[in-house]
Amino acid sequence: MLLFKRLSRSTWVLILISLIVSIAACKKDSDNTDPLAELNLPSTPYDYENIVFPDHYLTNDFPAGFPFQFAAMESDNTPLDNPTTNEGATLGRVLFYDKKLSANGTISCSSCHKQANGFSDDKVLSDGFQGGKTRRHSMGIVNARFYDTGKFFWDERAATLEDQVLMPFQDAVEMGLTLQQLEQIVQDQLYYAPLFADAFGDETINADRISKALSQFVRSIVSVNSKYDQGRVLVNNPILDFPNFTAEENLGKQLFYSQNLVAPSCNSCHMSEAFVAPLLAPNGTTIATNNGLDSVSTSDLGVFETTGINNQRGKFKVPSLKNIAQRAPFMHDGRFATLEEVIDHYSTGIQNHPTLQPFLIDSIGNPVQYNFTNQEKATLVAFLNTLTDLPLTVDDKFSNPFN
């Protein structure tokens, strides 16, 4: 205390000036902090726009006896006004993983679409921001760009992916925001301004740009490196045995593509070598289908809830089978815990619903039963496992940038 009393007035002035200078310097350093420091992003953006598609995504090599087949790229739903760019998808990646974009900062898009689970959820129903449960199981979004109508959700209530990506933010259970609140939260995060500038040419932040960036990221999540893809490049068409497959996997592939079953082959509903739904239906309304899960629709009417068209009761969107083995549980309500249960359904469990897929009805109007043997079931499971794209599930460019 005596030491402080002995300091002269001029000394106190010098100390005060020094403190002011130090505080100003600290503020300057804070102002110059990299706004992207919170994010784990590469200095040069990852390449999202130049996906190297294998030839079997670009060309239909199924023999002439296989009806309805097409090249995956024929069903690409990328709109002309929102092509994928490296900067746009980078922004979309950050938006996809940002938990701040929910009412209480606990939920992101990735909470229901987990990379390790084929961008689906391992829970039957997903958790919302307050612990509530979603109405349906989280659909896998791998190969989302290859759905010809461009409609999204199990009931196809979103006309485009650009519409779809904004809906969970506004859902009272999922993320609990309005679009105005979403825009404000994004504007409040310092790291978004430079990302929007890189993606769109200026720092303007709005819902339309959020939608476009998220859609670009989702469309970039394409599976091209599964065991199936690796084997397919070694042969001239998908019907031939793949050299990298086991005997069981090749038998399962033969059965999946077989034209000699009691009903059309599995790839009659999971078409092309992206294993997606058919091309646009003749009436242009839906390519969703009813696979006989129930004999009558009660609490969930599927696409009918969107369109009001009676013959669409109980019909649901068909997602790609890529990474299917990582996406348990299965179906829109997550009723099947394993692939074995799914195959059992097609083997003996198809129900005679009024809107049952015509392929699944026999000549006298009854639902078909494939009646697979235990060996056939095992080969089908082995084949479906070859559709797993492990590199996709660990690829940094699709991972959480907040880690």
Image (tube, grey):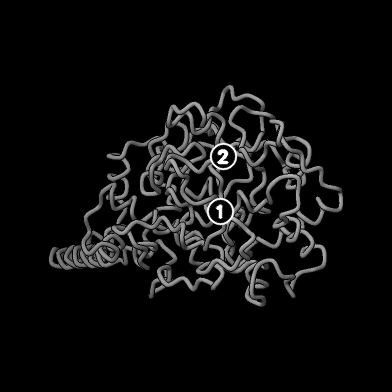
Question: How many residues crowd around disc 1 within 10 Å: few (fewer than 14), some, or many (20 or more)?
Answer: many
Q: Looking at the image, which is closer to me, 201 or 33?
A: 201
Q: Amino acid at mark 2?
A: Thr
Q: Looking at the image, which is closer to me, 133 or 228?
A: 228
Q: Residue at x 82, y 53 (%)?
A: 378
Q: Residue at x 44, y 65 (%)?
A: 40
On the question of residue 395 being in view, the answer is no
Q: Looking at the image, which is closer to me, 299 or 390?
A: 299
Q: Which residue is mark 1?
A: 276
The residue furthest bottom is: 234
The Cα atoms of the two marked residues, 1 and 2, are separated by: 12 Å
On the question of residue 169 being in view, the answer is yes
Q: Secondary structure at mark 2?
A: loop
Marks 1 and 2, the one that precedes in the sequence: 1
Tell me where residue 111 appears, x and y as whole percent: 52, 47
Q: Which residue is mark 2?
A: 289
The residue furthest top is: 298
Tell me where residue 372 appears, x and y as whole percent: 82, 46
Tell me where residue 384 appears, x and y as whole percent: 70, 56
Q: Amino acid at mark 1?
A: Val
Compared to residue 235, the image places residue 400 above or below, namely: above
